[in-house]
């Protein structure tokens, strides 16, 4: 999973992009990159780690221009090195070309094999570089047509920003898996993965980029190019609303906070519990726990405190470190928990290892009973569209029954939200009906899994 921001028609565009990336930092902490364009010339800077670590004033001063795009990177299939950080910037026959991408191209390895056979030289192992080669090798006459030609060969999930010369392009795959929004500020335009980036930049939200839409943005003008071929259905990722996006964002016309509260309320109806207090596994479950508390009437407490200074990727080489993995991130509030029957609300259960550690911490803090409630159905299938998830063998919901999971977590009761309940909750807060992708729960994959079917180890995600 990654976050992307583009700015067109506003001076010091790189600075705005860096600020936008701060708002999207939850979408990726492994690397950040910004490319700025001045008089058609692209300059790029990439750095490992957080935006704040890699982009000080001196770096931003060296990125002049009124067009820029940037990226924060989450996952690393394809390797941890900076060669896989974005933007990818090349010089081709139409000028400087830069690309940032959020999603996972499900025929990326197949296309790569074809391109390598034709003589293409790849510098990274990301699926995104395939798009660069397809644009450069297209036989279409104009940059617009080359871009569209290249995009039309991709399958799977791609929200992309591209600059060719000083022109910014934005596109979303025809299924619309990943979010992408258009905003306006000071006569120019901003495109971002989530609306929280527009808020930070004090930009006005204009609209979502539609599935299959390709926009050309230059000099304060937005032009809609010919759409990509429509998919059999649109399929925005429901997991963005459950877990990944920020609760202050609005995705596909749905407030993330409202969606999570609705999930929590539905969960309370489907999976009631006898408890003295309810609390969340912070932060992504806060809104769901609030909804559970509202519906059940059980008081909401802050039973777990999260340390915000630990990255998502904390890995310790020794067993001692692994034992501390949960403790370094969460600490229970003994005064809230001791002697109580507690209801713990989590947004999802993927491997179950963190939850097992948490339950043990909660028991050590003196809980009389622990009732675990999950505001989504069991995750039974991996995601191939850009959310970083383990293999099927590592998914606890694919391996064990609910009763066996309850036993493995060591809780007094365990309750998941149903698939129907999840969709009902989303319908209750959507402005208009949305046909979501729910493949990690239902195993019904909306877009073809070309590489997987051809036996490639599918992993490159962003
Ligand atoms: Fe989202 Fe799950 Fe679909 Fe992946 S499989 S796009 S995580 S809903």
Image (spheres, grey):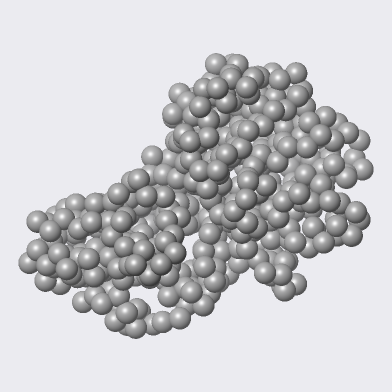
* Residue 5, x across and y down, in percent: 57, 35
Residue ID at (38%, 57%): 425
Res 192 quadrant in image: top right
* Residue 454, x across and y down, in percent: 75, 72
Front-most of residues 66 and 345: 66
**Would residue 174 be seen by someone viewing this image from the given angle?**
no
Residue 151 left/right relative to 336: right
Res 78 quadrant in image: bottom right
* Residue 241, x across and y down, in percent: 44, 52
Residue 117 left/right relative to 104: right
Front-most of residues 420 and 108: 108
Residue 448 left/right relative to 12: right
Is 152 placed above or below 322 here?
above
* Residue 74, x across and y down, in percent: 53, 50
Is 99 placed above or below 447 here?
above
**Would residue 282 be seen by someone viewing this image from the given angle?**
yes
Res 156 quadrant in image: bottom right
Residue 37 left/right relative to 147: left
Residue ID at (78%, 63%): 110
Residue ID at (24%, 52%): 305
Residue ID at (52%, 48%): 30
Is 405 placed above or below 151 here?
below
Front-most of residues 308 and 159: 308
Front-most of residues 266 and 433: 266
Question: What is the count of numbered marks?
Answer: 0
């Amino acid at each position: 999973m990654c976050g992307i921001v583009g700015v067109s028609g506003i001076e010091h565009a790189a600075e705005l992009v860096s600020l936008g990336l701060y708002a999207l930092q939850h979408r990726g902490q492994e690397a950040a990159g910004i490319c700025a364009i001045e008089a058609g010339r692209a300059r790029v800077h990439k750095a490992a780690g957080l935006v704040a670590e890699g982009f000080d004033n001196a770096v931003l001063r060296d990125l002049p221009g009124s067009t820029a795009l940037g990226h924060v990177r989450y996952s690393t299939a394809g390797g941890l090195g900076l060669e896989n950080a974005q933007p990818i910037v090349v010089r081709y026959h139409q000028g400087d070309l830069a690309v940032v991408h959020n999603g996972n191209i499900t025929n990326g390895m197949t296309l790569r094999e074809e391109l390598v056979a034709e003589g293409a030289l790849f510098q990274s192992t990301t699926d995104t570089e395939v798009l660069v080669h397809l644009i450069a090798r297209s036989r279409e006459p104009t940059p617009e047509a080359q871009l569209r030609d290249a995009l039309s060969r991709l399958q799977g999930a791609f929200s992309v920003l591209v600059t060719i010369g000083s022109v910014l392009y934005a596109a979303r795959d025809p299924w619309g898996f990943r979010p992408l929004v258009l905003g306006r500020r000071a006569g120019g335009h901003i495109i971002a993965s989530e609306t929280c980036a527009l808020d930070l930049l004090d930009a006005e939200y204009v609209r979502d980029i539609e599935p299959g839409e390709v926009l050309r943005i230059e000099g304060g003008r937005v032009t809609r190019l010919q759409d990509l071929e429509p998919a059999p259905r649109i399929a925005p990722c429901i997991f963005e609303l459950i877990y990944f996006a920020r609760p202050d964002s609005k995705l596909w016309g749905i407030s993330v906070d409202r969606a999570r509260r609705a999930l929590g309320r539905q969960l309370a109806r489907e999976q009631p519990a006898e408890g003295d207090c309810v609390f969340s596994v912070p932060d992504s479950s806060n809104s769901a726990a609030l909804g559970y508390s509202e519906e059940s009437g059980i008081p909401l407490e802050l039973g777990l405190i999260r340390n915000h200074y630990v990255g998502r990727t904390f890995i310790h080489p020794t067993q001692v470190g692994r034992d501390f993995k949960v403790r370094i991130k969460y600490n229970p509030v003994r005064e809230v928990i001791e002697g109580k029957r507690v209801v713990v609300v989590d947004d999802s259960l993927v491997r179950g290892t963190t939850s097992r550690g948490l339950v043990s911490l909660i028991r050590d803090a003196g809980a009389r009973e622990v009732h675990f409630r999950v505001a989504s159905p069991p995750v039974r299938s991996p995601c191939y569209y850009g959310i970083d998830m383990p293999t099927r063998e590592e998914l606890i919901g694919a391996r064990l029954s609910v009763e066996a999971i309850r036993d493995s977590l060591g809780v007094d009761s365990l309750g998941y939200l149903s698939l129907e309940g999840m969709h009902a909750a989303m319908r209750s807060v959507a402005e208009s009906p949305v046909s979501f992708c729910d493949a990690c729960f239902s195993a019904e994959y909306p877009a073809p899994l070309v590489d997987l079917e051809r036996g490639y180890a599918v992993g490159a995600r962003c």
